[in-house]
Image (cartoon, rainbow, N blue to C red):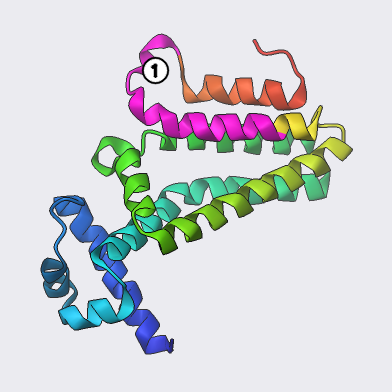
Amino acid sequence: MNAAANATRDHIVEEAQTLLADVGSSGFRIVALAKRANVGVPTIYYHFASREQVIAQAQLRTYFELTRPMAAYFSHMAEAVAAGDADRFRAELMGDVTATWVAGHFQEDVGVMRLLLDIWADPATRQEFRDIVDSRYRNWVDLLERAQELGWVESAPHAATGVAVFWAASVGLAILPHASDDGVTAERVAELCWGLISGAPVR
């Protein structure tokens, strides 16, 4: 696909994001998207196999935007490991877990469950999403193993399991909107995660 075609596809996805924010998945219509993006309906179907794929790709882009802070934290953690800076590693890891937990809410107007269901509705986008998540998880495991070599992490496999649990919990948080009323805060979760990974006592 040439640069012009890529630009057109990206433009359609961006406009699809905006349309989804306005009408949601159930109200999403290709004709409305074509009008908003100022392209013909055949152009949309040239770039996408179905209405579901357009929605899934728009939601995947939303996922990237929502998780961008976590990617930055991970990059900083890797820098801390390379520099041998244990304090920065801990701070960045806790920042990452806190951001992930907060993002579990995904703001009520976005809706994490709807986002994931929309991504899952298209097989190609579902596989793309799974590949991205698998890659990020492997990167986490690799980083934890390096941190273990430095003595900062008690057990990399054990810590990797903890990361999986906290990632899953951050998504599950979407169905627990009042969890913070019971003292379940993002900061508290980050402390618990650090304790599990490092073996440090949790206050």
The part of the image, by quadrant, that contains residue 110 is top left
The part of the image, by quadrant, that contains residue 90 is top right
From the viewer's perspective, is 122 left or right of 30? right
Residue at the image position 32 percent from the left and 51 percent from the top: 118
From the viewer's perspective, is 8 left or right of 98? left
> For residue 191: magenta?
no
Q: Regarding mark 1 in the picture, which secondary structure is present there?
A: helix
Of residue 190 and residue 174, the one placed in the foreground of this image is 174
Residue on which disc 1 sits: 180
Residue at the image position 50 percent from the left and 47 percent from the top: 69
Q: Which residues are magenta?
A: 160-183
Question: Chief secondary structure of the magenta span?
Answer: helix
Residue at the image position 23 percent from the left and 82 percent from the top: 43
Residue 181 pos. (x, y %): 36, 13
Amino acid, disc 1: Ser
Is residue 141 visible in the rendered image? The answer is yes
Q: Residues within 10 Å of mark 1 (few under 14, many from 20)?
A: few
Of residue 1 and residue 37, the one placed in the foreground of this image is 1
The number of numbered discs placed on residues in the rendered structure image is 1
From the viewer's perspective, is 55 left or right of 75? left
Rendered view: 122 above or below 134? below
Query: From the image, which quarter does the N terminus lie in?
Result: bottom left
Is residue 76 visible in the rendered image? The answer is no
> For residue 168: magenta?
yes
Rendered view: 26 above or below 107? below
Residue 4 pos. (x, y %): 36, 88
Residue 77 pos. (x, y %): 69, 44
Of residue 180 and residue 161, the one placed in the foreground of this image is 161
Of residue 20 and residue 107, the one placed in the foreground of this image is 20
From the viewer's perspective, is 22 left or right of 124? left
Residue at the image position 58 percent from the left and 29 percent from the top: 165
Query: From the image, which quarter does the C terminus lie in?
Result: top right
